[in-house]
Image: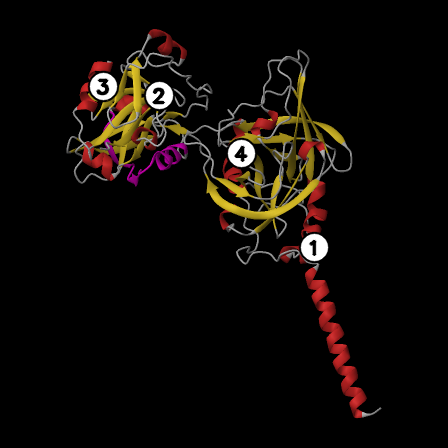
Amino acid sequence: MTRPFVVASLGLTATVAFLVGLIVAGGQAPAASPSSGPPVPREFAVSGASLSLPGGIAGATSFADVAEHLNPTVVNIDATSRGPGWDRRQTPVLPGRPDLFDRPFDPDRGEGREGIGTGFVFDPSGLILTNHHVIAGAERVMVRFASGQQVRAAIVGSDPETDIAVLKVDTGGLLLAAPLGDSDRLRVGEWVCAIGNPLAYEHSVTVGVVSFIGRKLSETSLERYIQTDAAINLGNSGGPLINARGEVVGINAAVSSRGSSIGFAVPINQARAILPALMADGRVSRGFLGAVVQPVTPELRRSLGLGAATGALVQDVVAGSPAARAGLRPYDVVLDVNGEPASTNDTLAAAMASLRPGAPVTVHLMRDGRTVALATRLSERPRSGASEESPPAAGARLEMRGPALGLFVRELDREFRMRYRVPDEARGVVVSKVEPLSPASDADIARGHVVLEINRRETATVDAFRREVGAARAGDVLTFYLFNPDRQQRELRSVHVEP
């Protein structure tokens, strides 16, 4: 064999090997994120043997392998009720808010109702995770496995605040269980897949990336959703969101009502944290202070004369709550609670929810330039149930337009007070119209809000409102203290007066 022939043969072999390598590499899914480390210990200890994935799956480069091994752990859930009174759409569908996944139904039907959803086995003994809204109000819950086996499930516990529910099935033996990952280690851009039953197409697999972490969809909620563009639809509720290591990192729960490929999943660590309470008591009890706060902004500091105070400004105190019993008032500036800063309503609510009802708390606050310490004990956080109805137009009675504010108001009458549950002690004027692109609109003041005070002075009548606004000059900042019927709470808004 001549030397040139040997050289040519080696070159041809190398070229073929290189091309084959490109073809093989091109057929693989994106590699696992470097943030995915070894599985973390589970906070909720279980007995039995969990699903044992092949060694290669720990660093899986193909979601085909992930889906093949986790599909048997995913179940279809049929939740039914005999009567027409059951409505699983418990969370209001508001503009810009996500829709909870469920099967639409005809409200005029008198027969029983049925909804579909998804779940997954997380414990070999037959424990299944899904969404609260999938099974809320159901009288019978049936679970169907990929093998076709169908069994009735018992509801162990559920939590509407985080939209988590635990079911229990008995199949006469241990089940394959999906391994739980660590959602705190997720990164934006990391590849994930969803397995579920969208539109009754069972065990559908879709792939996308993590679009955002910690998305908040409601100001009064405790959720911090994982946002993903993995395609999910009605019926995906309760299904697993899985990383490239084959670990469940979220529970698919909602989809944007305004766009496609925008879905939301409850972080698995949030579910883990409440599993012990759900297993022991069937529900989660959380501490509640009853103070609604907001950050102290430069505008609020200027208009209310708060000086150098830093903290969270109290804008509402729930009647009969621990905050009310302790003596908290609107315009107090909360410095800390039990030594922990409470700069926003989110941080305060989350801190209180992490404590048990009855836990003692000490609130340090600034009031009229003096530091005050108030002690109380937390009550139990009430379940979400704010009014879903938005106030309509106020009619033709446009009594007064605020100068340079783009705001119309009218007197608060008995009909409006009763219809929108305005507290008896609340005295003010009703916002009947807000002009687009106006200072009032920029401050998120909306039709139906009840203006109680401006810069801490009452506006119980249209005349009083006219006096306070009429005294303002261009460049001033007015702090509106108002009642929001949508949220059934008092809130503060800063309005910049324009020329």
Question: Residue lying furthest bottom in this view?
Answer: 2
Magenta region, residue range: 329-353
The disc at residue 465 is 3
Report the quarter where the N terminus lies: bottom right
Residue named by callout 4: 258
Viewer-nearest of labels 3 and 1? Answer: 3
Residue type, mark 3 in image: Phe
Q: Mark on residue 433?
A: 2
Residue 54 got which mark? 1
* Distance CA(mark 2)–CA(mark 4): 25 Å
Badge 1 marks a residue whose secondary structure is: loop
Q: Above or below — where is 396 with respect to 26?
A: above
Front one among 445 and 146: 445
Kind of residue at disc 1? Pro
Label 4's element?
A: loop
Question: Residue at image x 65%, y 37%?
Answer: 120
Question: Of marks 3 and 1, which one's residue comes earlier in the chain?
Answer: 1
Q: Position of residue 149 (x, y in %)?
A: 77, 33
